[in-house]
Image (cartoon, rainbow, N blue to C red):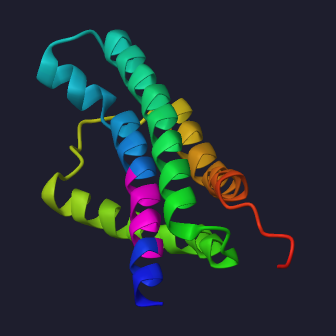
């Protein structure tokens, strides 16, 4: 039981890390632009490509880990709630170590992307769990 608990928390932390990285990339487009010297639009396109490729790679990793570790267990759905505290922890730690600059503006479309991603993320987790852990007929 303890091994399952550790695996469940590991997957939940990885879910939170994936969303955290995607959101931080979106929020820091202007910072990345100023650090690299690239045009703002170029950084935005690169971040979008990284996020799409990251989502595809993360999906493959999450499906394989869930298939390997959860093996048809209904308890795998606890990850729907467990990713939230890890996400809050990552955001809190990041803002302590890398504070948001006061001169940086977060555009409304970024806020919409962040809000939409956060709202749809549990649907993504359900998709992973339904696909990776089909329940056995006797359950």
User: Which image quarter: residue 94?
Assistant: bottom left
- Please tell me which residue is depicted at 57% across the width and 57% down the height of the picture: 67
| Left or right position of 119 against 70 | right
Residue 26 in magenta stretch: no
| Left or right position of 36 against 54 | left
- Please tell me which residue is depicted at 23% across the width and 44% down the height of the picture: 102
Asked whether 106 or 1 is in front, the reply is 1
- Please tell me which residue is depicted at 77% across the width and 67% down the height of the picture: 135
| Number of numbered callouts drawn | 0
Q: Residue furthest right?
A: 137
Residue 76: x %, y % from top left: 61, 72
The stretch in magenta equals 8-17
Asked whether 72 or 114 is in front, the reply is 72
Q: Point out the image quarter for the C terminus.
A: bottom right
Residue 63: x %, y % from top left: 55, 49
User: Above or below — where is 8 with respect to 56?
Assistant: below
Residue 52: x %, y % from top left: 49, 27
Is residue 45 visible to us here? yes
Asked whether 96 or 61 is in front, the reply is 61
- Please tell me which residue is depicted at 45% across the width and 23% down the height of the picture: 48
User: Looking at the magenta stretch, what is its main secondary structure?
Assistant: helix
Asked whether 42 or 60 is in front, the reply is 60
Residue 51: x %, y % from top left: 44, 31
Is residue 85 visible to us here? no
User: Above or below — where is 90 with respect to 55?
Assistant: below
User: Above or below — where is 134 with respect to 27?
Assistant: below
User: Above or below — where is 64 with respect to 84?
Assistant: above
Q: Residue furthest bottom?
A: 1
Residue 9 in magenta stretch: yes
């Amino acid at each position: 039981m303890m091994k399952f608990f550790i695996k469940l928390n590991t997957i939940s932390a990885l879910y939170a890390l994936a969303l955290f990285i995607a959101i931080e990339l979106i929020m820091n487009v202007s910072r990345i632009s100023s650090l690299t010297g690239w045009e703002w639009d170029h950084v935005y396109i690169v971040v979008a490509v990284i996020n799409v490729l990251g989502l595809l790679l993360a999906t493959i990793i999450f499906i394989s880990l869930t298939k390997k570790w959860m093996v048809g267990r209904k308890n795998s759905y606890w990850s729907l709630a467990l990713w939230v505290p890890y996400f809050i922890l990552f955001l809190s730690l990041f803002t302590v170590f890398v504070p948001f600059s006061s001169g940086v503006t977060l555009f409304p479309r970024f806020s919409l992307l962040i809000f939409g991603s956060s709202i749809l993320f549990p649907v993504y987790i359900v998709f992973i769990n339904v696909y990776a852990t089909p329940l056995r007929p006797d359950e």
